[in-house]
Image: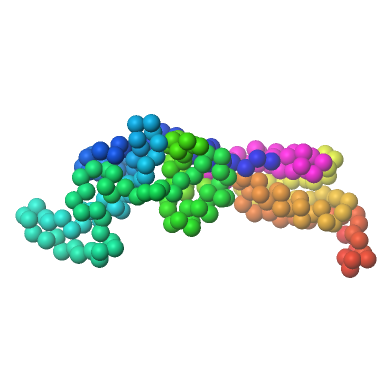
Amino acid sequence: MRHRTVFEVMTHDVVTAAPQTPFKQSARLFAGNGASAVPVVDPGRRLLGPVPEADLLRSTAELPGLEGRWAGVRLLSQERGPPDAETADQPMTSPAVTARPRWNLAGTALTTHRKRVKRLPVVDGTGRLVGIFSRSGLLRPFLRDDTAIREEIEHDVPADTLRLAPGTIRVVFDDGVVRLTGRVDARADIPVIVRLCRSVDGAVALHESIEYAYEDLALGGEPPR
């Protein structure tokens, strides 16, 4: 079994800014690429920090209108961006919350939730930017072909992981929903099978009606079914 990684779902072609990129050019990067944050990198492509779109907006919220009049917006001090930000490194958030290419999707999803971010810059071991992970990437495993998911459940879990004989577990898979039937020796094997099958990327729900041959009745178990 192999869980999908950040590397497999991240955006590899990333629009970046240099520390001295003019403020106005940073705004164009947002407008032209539909990004919610632009990473700022040094000449070696090492990540310095992201410029969130929200920070650019905060930096301009209290600017006067075209006629020099107050636009009617007053931000609290903690809401204000850097005063008179002229370059990308001034509204930049540092240190950045990042991800690594080999992280699994479950752990990465937890990071985005805890840090309340939608996108994570992905860096290698040297801090060099290699991609951008967005929360939409979490949905990609569920777009896998049904046949590929069913084959992974049928072969990787029973045969390769649990060493069960071929045909011990039968799998019906329909639009992300897994149904398991078959017969195993010990009842204690069933929760293990269910847990492993449920963790296959792309499985939305799982139902089982697996029979078993025996259980240790001395431990208060139920008779075979």
Residue 108 in the figure: left or right of residue 118: right
The furthest residue to the left: 67
Vertical placement of residue 51 versus 61, above or below: above
Give left or right: position of 114 versus 184: left
Tell me the quarter of the image containing the C terminus: bottom right
Q: Residue at x 62, y 45 (%)?
A: 201
Q: Is residue 134 visible?
A: no
Residue sitting at the far right: 218
> Which residue is depicted at the point 90% across and 59% down?
215
- Can the viewer see residue 156 in this picture? yes
Instruction: Report the coloring of the rendering.
Output: rainbow
- 74 sits left or right of 121 in the view: left
Which residue of the protein is positioned furthest toward the bottom in this rendering?
Answer: 220
Return the x and y of residue 21 as percentages of the image width and height.
25, 38
Tell me, yes or no, whether the highlighted magenta stretch contains residue 84: no
On-image quarter of the N terminus: top right
Boundaries of the magenta span: 139-163
Asked if the stretch drawn in magenta spans residue 160, the answer is yes
Q: Residue at x 77, y 56 (%)?
A: 191
List x then y, in percent, for residue 107: 56, 50
Q: Nearer the viewer, residue 216 or 86?
A: 86
Image x and y of residue 217, in percent: 92, 64
| Residue at x 36% of width, y 45% of height | 50
Chief SS of the magenta region: helix
- The percent position of residue 200, horizontal first and vertical second, equals 66, 46
Front in this rendered view, residue 221 or 129: 129
